[in-house]
Amino acid sequence: MSATKPLNVDDYEALAREKLSPMALAYYASGAHDEVTLRANRSAFERLALHHRVLVDVSRRDLATTVLGAKVSMPVLIAPTAFHGLACAERELATVRAAGKAGTVMTLSTLATCSVDAVCAAASGPVWFQLYVFKDRGATAALARRAEAAGAKALVLTVDAPLLGRRERDVRNRFALPQGLCVENLVPEGMSDLPASVADSGLAAYFESLIDPALTWRDLEWLRGTTRLPLILKGVVRADDARRAVDHGAAGVVVSNHGGRQLDTSPATIDVLPRVVDAVAGRIEVLLDGGVRRGTDVLKALALGARAVLVGRPILWGLAAGGEAGALAVLEILRAELDLAMALAGCPTVGHATRDLVTG
């Protein structure tokens, strides 16, 4: 790659590939099994066409919106991704500072290498906390309450990972965290270390031993009773599940296939977004992640009914390439691309991104 300034998310990925260790790169980049869904998330966006309007006054554009009632400067949020310490010495603290400077939400993973207390203390904007439910329900409830006490504004429950998807690159590498990194949020519960010396992915072994695969819809009432935080379900791709989320008191859903890292051949998220939006019929907010790499992707998701999108890997590429400044640069690239796409499509505000803009 040339020494010119990175122009887009792919440029940051190229820089990250030069800096990350082979194990860290494989962990961040990989999908499950044949990585069909990983590729589909991108190709589905590329299939969709934007039918731009003309002769619209777009001399001023407003990208601002709200999510769960909180104002954000643009409909691009940071998705939960694990182990930022593999990319950047400042770990998730760099990410949350970038989010604050960009005026958007950071979603902190349960599997972070900084604690929720430290991240919320460093935040200048909203932090949501992504939660896995452990077999030890007491530990899960304590973690949720700790997130609320630290200042998190929502719980994002990942619902598509009763077991970890088979990520063959991690299996070949026998993925493990380097010395000095652990799951900081689980230190008080004594569950902070991934198994060592396993003939597989250490993270897969961690999931199998600790995460509860018996979680059902009936358990959402229990979880909602652990804190006062609104609950968002992440990992929904079906209309009937979206309706169940409404019925069980969720404040929102994230249309997500875990970045292609869980059930391979599950559908691309942008393909199923419209049916989820139609199913909830405005009763709760719908977000989307998976494959967002351009401002035009964001505009397509908004047009198909998403309140906002979340980006995961692009933030990791920015962190690896340039720490906090790199993560912020990625967000600002997406902001600039979305602003241009809105202007060219005849959308002076995000509210003008309506379904008639998109076909495919």
Image (tube, grey):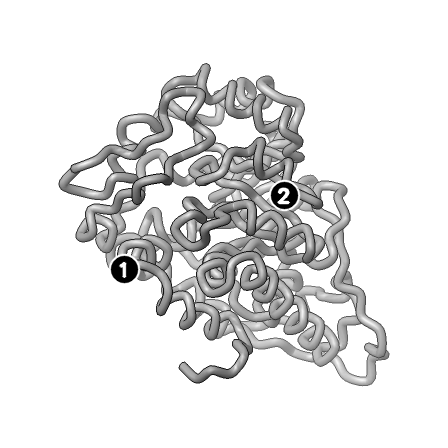
Q: Is residue 269 visible?
A: no
Callout 2 amino acid: Val
Residue at image point 44% right, 33% down: 184
Depicted 297 relative to depicted 245: above or below: below
Label 2 and label 1: CA atoms lie apart by 42 Å
Q: Which residue is mark 2?
A: 280
Residue at image point 58% right, 72% down: 359
Is 165 on the left or on the right of 2, as rendered? left
Callout 1 amino acid: Pro
Q: Which residue is mark 1?
A: 22
Determine the secondary structure under disc 2: helix
Q: Residue 209: percent from the left, percent from the top?
A: 27, 27
Outermost residue to the top: 138
Residue at image point 43% right, 38% down: 111
Q: Residue 271: percent from the left, percent from the top?
A: 49, 60
Is 203 on the left or on the right of 248, as rendered? left
Determine the secondary structure under disc 1: helix
Q: Residue 53: percent from the left, percent from the top?
A: 74, 79
Depicted 188 relative to depicted 265: above or below: above
Observer-nearest of 159 and 184: 184
- Res 144 → quadrant: top right
Depicted 248 relative to depicted 336: above or below: above
